Image (cartoon, rainbow, N blue to C red):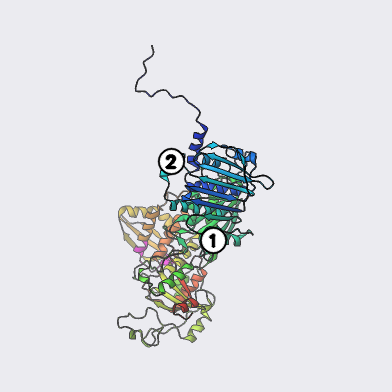
Amino acid sequence: MSAAPDPRDPPPAHVRRLDPILVDRIAAGEVVERPASAVKELVENAIDAGARSIEVAIEGGGRRLIRVIDDGIGMGADDLALAVERHATSKLPDGDLTRIGSLGFRGEALPSIGAVSRLTITSRTADGEGVSLTLDSGAKGPVRPAPASRGTRIEVSELFAATPARLKFLKTDRAETAAVSEILRRLAVAQPQIRFTLRTESGSPTVFPAESEPGPAALLRRLGAVLGPDFPGNAVPVDMAREGFALAGHVGLPTFHRGAASHIHFVVNGRPVRDRLLLGAVRGAYADTMSSDRHPVLALHLTCDPALVDVNVHPAKTELRFREPGLVRALIVSAIHEALRRAGARSSSTGTQAALDALRAGGSLGEAPPMAAGAGRFAVHSGVSTASALSPRPASRLFFGPSVAAPAGYRPAPRPAYTEDHPGFAETPQALFSADLAPPGADLRPEPESFLEAEAHPETHPLGAARAQIHETYIVAQTRDGIVLVDQHAAHERLVYERLKRERAGGGVLAQGLLIPDVVEMAPEEADRLVEAAPELERLGLTLEAFGPGAVLVRSVPSALAGGSVKGLVLDVLDALEASGVEEGGPAGAGDPDPVSQRLDAILSRMSCHGSIRAGRRLKPEEMNALLREMEATPLSGSCNHGRPTFVSLGLADIERLFGRR
């Protein structure tokens, strides 16, 4: 006898097939998240149709109206009737999902949008008649004749009217308009040969003119229109290929950065994407040139065989899966590194404008925030205490080191000691200006004969000739057509770091043994961490061993850092280990092509900061000039390891404008 049913059990439910309109509305939840999603799908359809001019108009942030007009190949009556059916498309002629060459391919966009709005499509082919069709909340109307020019015109009105609950999750009209604008900008970067126009209720339209001739110059013009007029002057070209992948585009200098990652543009086979692997590669490439809270500005096009990448892994098709992710990441990191090194000693031109803004009437250098690309006022950062950490050393040893030869023809010029009769810039002692002023921060520059004897026409160098040191922190150099202000600590920090990296890549950092080994005390767990990492640290010139509980014995330090505080160096290395999990056997970063190398570079970066010239250290003219010459010969010397600028240039014309001479 069967048991009686439990009244608490739910009634039996039978499996049934959902209504087609309900299916479309469910699918629309994935495809049409917000008005910008609908714009993206419709514009991608226009691009696939061969359009060379695409106009987008929105009202109410896209809620009330989205209109997309293109001059593509258009559709006839039969194609139009089928285009609004689910999973109907012209973009997979052979049905091969492993070789997708179009932006769209699922055939879901039009029926999904039509299921949650009123959708009207009007289209005409080059040799056909105009036709029109309407979908109202999923209900399909008949195909009717309609006047039309070649191409397609799509109007989406009352988006999400059929699913009012979705309206509650939309943001303000301004935020939705901004999202639409961002979508169009990313498509404009991906397709520079197409003219894009965006019309909103806010005023004049945004227009990106078509670039008729392909190539790097055309792409750079489009990038200037999308990323701002400052970008072309602060970008370097990228062009590298490896094992079936080709990477081209432009990347911003490390000192040209923004506070958000929205200015990083990646295009894969003509498709704009926001993929974590690619963004991680960019972070890795800029890791030792930019602060972790800043983001570069760049646009890179990656081209490969469609079979090497799977685009069918995300509803919005913004994420990808590469067959060889490690190869792609290594290509991006190598290409960006090579481009930035090729740029040499360059710093963002926006620093010059920010400096001029700060120097004009009303500017306040003391209140200026950190410099950022495109905005803000200028401030120079030393980021260190004023205590000197290094003993005086000859200029050739201090700057060039054992692994860097001094520039050809370099000879330190003799200079007299500072006296009240030789105050430097002024012929009258500076004490006449104010009794409270400290003695000049710069030693007297050599007499003209001695100066020219040291080096003929030093102003012809890119960073010019040192003329003074102010506040024992900044070097003032004169170039042929202006002046250069150099942060001595930030600049030397980069030079020491690059020198240590060269030595490590050449077989190991040169070490200098200590005549008397130094004992450094710390917490027992910190000492254990250092001892565990000792094999890696020895490759960096730092040799240490356990010396009882809570102490380590240091036997050698990198020769480039000799003369500094051994305890300070060891504690800096310990901080680097704790910050990045660098002890031997520590976890590697996801997708890192060489996590050990990145860990060692992180330690070298901390070492170089410890061993660099500090603010408050008075330099001789030959030392300042040696620093400038090595900066010119060292890649990436336009920024320190933390992304701060090392120098700012002011043209003579800019200075004359400050004083009303122009």
**Residue 100 lies within the magenta run:** no
Side (left or right) of 403 relative to 572: right
Indicate the amino acid at tag 2.
Answer: Pro
- The furthest residue to the right: 127
Say which of marks 1 and 2 sits in front: 2
559 left or right, relative to 462 = left
Question: Helix, strand or loop at disc 2?
Answer: helix
Percent from the top left, x then y, of residue 523?
Answer: 30, 55
Count of number-bearing discs: 2
The residue range painted magenta reads: 557-570
Of 489 and 141, nearer the camera is 141
Q: Are marks 1 and 2 in contact (CB under 8 Å)?
A: no
* Image location (x, y in percent) of residue 158: 48, 44
Where's residue 230, x and y in %?
51, 65
- The amino acid type found where label 1 is placed reads Ala
Residue 164, numbered label: 2
Neighbour tally class for label 2: few under 14, some 14-19, many 20 plus, Cα within 10 Å: few
The image quadrant of residue 292 is bottom left
Asked whether 565 falls inside the magenta stretch, the response is yes
Question: In the image shown, does 2 or 58 lie closer to the viewer?
Answer: 58
Taking the image as shown, residue 479 lies to the left or right of residue 2, namely right
Mark 1, other Cα within 10 Å: few <14 / some 14–19 / many ≥20: many
Estimate the spatial distance between the alpha carbons at disc 1 and disc 2, rounded to whole Å: 37 Å
Q: Which is more N-terminal, label 2 or label 1?
A: 2
Above or below, 251 against 446 in this view is above
* Element marked by disc 1: helix
| Left or right of residue 551: residue 557 | right
Q: Is residue 131 above or below residue 633?
A: above
Can the viewer see residue 92? no
* Residue 225 disc label: 1
**From the image, which quarter does the N terminus lie in?**
top left
Where is residue 345 drawn, in percent x and y? 50, 68
